[in-house]
Structures are given as C-alpha cells and as structure tokens.
C-alpha cells in the first residue's frame, strides 16, 4: 500500500469490537463531536455490493455467510477511501483492521506517511448482549442514522429523528445464523488484535455494556486525550 492522505497531525483512531459492540454508533458520535471521518469497511463493502462492482460481487456471498471478506479486497477498498480529501481531517476506523494481515498493512501505510495510530479502542461487550443489540437494529435509509427497537427507538415510530425519512432498513446479515458465524470470525481472527495493539502500547479498553451516552462520553475523553 502507498501512503495515506491523512496528514501527520490528524488523528488515526481504531474502534475494535465484536458485531453489535456499538462501533458504528460511537464512530458517528465521534465524527460529529470531533470533525473526524468514520471509515467503516462494512459500509464500504455494502456500498460495493449495492453498486455491483467486481469487489462487491466477490464480497456479497462472503458477507451473507458471516465470514470475513478477503484481506486483498478490503485493503484495496480502504486504501481508495483513505486517499479521498476529507480524510485529511483525521479518521476513525470502524471494523478495520480485522486480521493481523490488515493490521500490519495499516502499520506500513501509516509508516510510509510518517503517521501513527493514536489509539486502538476496544469496545468490550459480552456475546449475549451483542445478539440482543443486533436483533433489534435498523438504520435510516435516508441518512444512515442507526436505531434499535428497544435501546434507541426514533421519537416518531418509523421516522428518522435526524432527516425525517420513513425508509428504515434492516441488514441481511443480522439473522441468528449469520450472527453466530460473525461472532466466531471475531473471536478467531479479530480478537487477537487486542494483544497486537496492547503490545504496541496503543490499546485502550472501554466497558461498552453501559448506555450509549455514557460510553460516548468515555470515548470523547479518550479521544481528547490521545489527540492532544
Ligand atoms: P460490519 O458492518 O463491520 O459489521 P460488524 O463488525 O459485524 O459490526 P456491526 O455493524 O454489526 O456492529 P457495530 O459494532 O457497528 O454496532 P452498532 O453500532 O450498529 O461488517 C459486516 C461484514 O462485512 C462482516 O461480517 C464481513 O463479512 C465484512 N467486513 C467488514 N469489515 C471487514 C474487514 N475489515 N475485513 C474483512 N471483512 C470485513 O450497534 C448495534 C445495535 O445496538 C444498534 O441498533 C445500536 O443502536 C445498538 N447499540 C449500540 N450501542 C448500544 C449500547 N451501549 N446499549 C444498547 N444498545 C446499543
């Protein structure tokens, strides 16, 4: 990979965590609060699937099974996104890296640009909570705001609080069978990155079992500290 478009001083934050840990929810809050750009490889892959690109065609069946898409495809998609001008504000990597190969490729990419990871933040939740969160999840089709049947329902049913759209979307991979595979992939391939970043002195662990606002406040304090 060549260098990224993120300048030296701009923060590079990683949100690690299993499916349903709240990575997307919290990344969007940090984006709003700190003017950073959320880079979700899940969203980028879903966009590639929807656009019918070659990468999207290859990723579709893998994502539906709950397994991880190949490092090659994910790295190519992430590299293209990082080269876009808005990433100069600093980035929150949501759902990337997910394998040691991806983590090492990111290290090389940042090294080539004289950058570093400010923090790899692990959102810690237990497996039972993840399944509950994923089962109730839906998203606004207009602006992408995330909701939950129990924990974060819109003020007016089926209407987005943010943009007023009434188009709500549930993800194809949010079914019990696929969630079990996604959890398995997390424990086998992604959880080892907790030790990887701990070894580099970049790991910060956050108890993500509490309510969304309290976790956002903890994360805000961490981001202020590591970005200073
Ligand atoms: P991706 O889209 O990244 O999905 P994921 O990691 O499974 O994570 P989720 O989006 O399901 O959960 P989240 O942690 O963002 O939780 P959220 O904030 O939505 O990946 C999908 C697929 O793409 C993968 O399976 C793989 O195939 C592929 N892929 C992606 N990246 C890849 C990579 N790097 N390498 C290879 N393959 C890759 O929260 C969930 C729900 O809970 C929401 O409804 C929310 O409102 C609610 N909630 C959040 N926080 C709380 C809280 N504190 N209390 C109560 N409810 C909460």
Image (tube, rainbow, N blue to C red):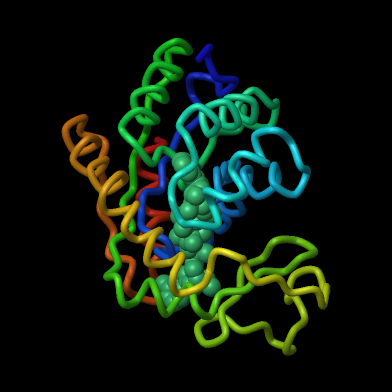
Front one among 225 and 41: 41
Look at the image and tell me in which quarter the C terminus lies: top left
Q: Going by the image, does 131 lie left or right of 52?
A: left
Q: Quadrant of residue 214?
A: bottom left
Residue at horizontal 43 percent and vertical 19 percent from the top: 110
Q: Going by the image, does 214 lie left or right of 199?
A: right
Q: Is residue 9 above or below residue 149?
A: above
Residue at horizontal 39 percent and vertical 56 percent from the top: 219
Residue 157 percent location from the top left of the image: 72, 89
Residue 94 seen in this snapshot: no
Residue 139 seen in this snapshot: yes
Q: Quadrant of residue 115?
A: top left
Q: Is residue 105 above or below residue 94?
A: above
Q: Please give the count of numbered marks on the rendered protein.
A: 0
Front one among 149 and 73: 73
Front one among 51 and 222: 51
Q: Quadrant of residue 89?
A: top right
Residue 4 percent location from the top left of the image: 55, 19
Residue 142 percent location from the top left of the image: 80, 64
Q: Going by the image, does 110 lie left or right of 27?
A: left
Residue at horizontal 48 percent and vertical 13 percent from the top: 113
Residue 13 percent location from the top left of the image: 43, 39
Q: Going by the image, does 40 lie left or right of 123?
A: right
Residue at horizontal 53 percent and vertical 69 percent from the top: 174
């Amino acid at each position: 990979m060549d260098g990224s478009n993120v300048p030296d001083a701009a923060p590079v934050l990683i949100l690690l965590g299993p499916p349903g840990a709240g990575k997307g929810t919290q990344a969007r809050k940090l984006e709003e609060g700190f003017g950073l750009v959320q880079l979700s490889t899940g969203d980028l892959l879903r966009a590639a699937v929807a656009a019918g690109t070659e990468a999207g065609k290859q990723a579709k069946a893998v994502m539906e099974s709950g397994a991880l898409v190949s490092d090659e495809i994910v790295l190519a998609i992430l590299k293209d996104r990082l080269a876009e001008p808005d990433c100069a504000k600093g980035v929150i990597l949501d759902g990337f890296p997910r394998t040691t190969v991806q983590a090492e490729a990111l290290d090389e990419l940042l090294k080539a640009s004289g950058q570093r990871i400010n923090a790899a933040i692990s959102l810690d939740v237990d497996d039972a909570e993840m399944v509950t969160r994923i089962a109730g999840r839906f998203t606004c089709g207009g602006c992408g705001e995330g909701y939950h049947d129990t924990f974060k329902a819109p003020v007016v049913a089926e209407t987005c609080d943010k943009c007023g759209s009434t188009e709500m979307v549930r993800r194809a991979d949010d079914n019990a069978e696929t969630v079990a595979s996604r959890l398995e992939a997390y424990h086998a391939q992604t959880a080892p990155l907790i030790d990887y970043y701990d070894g580099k002195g970049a790991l910060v662990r956050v108890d993500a079992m509490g309510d969304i606002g309290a976790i956002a406040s903890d994360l805000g304090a961490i981001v202020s500290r590591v970005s200073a």
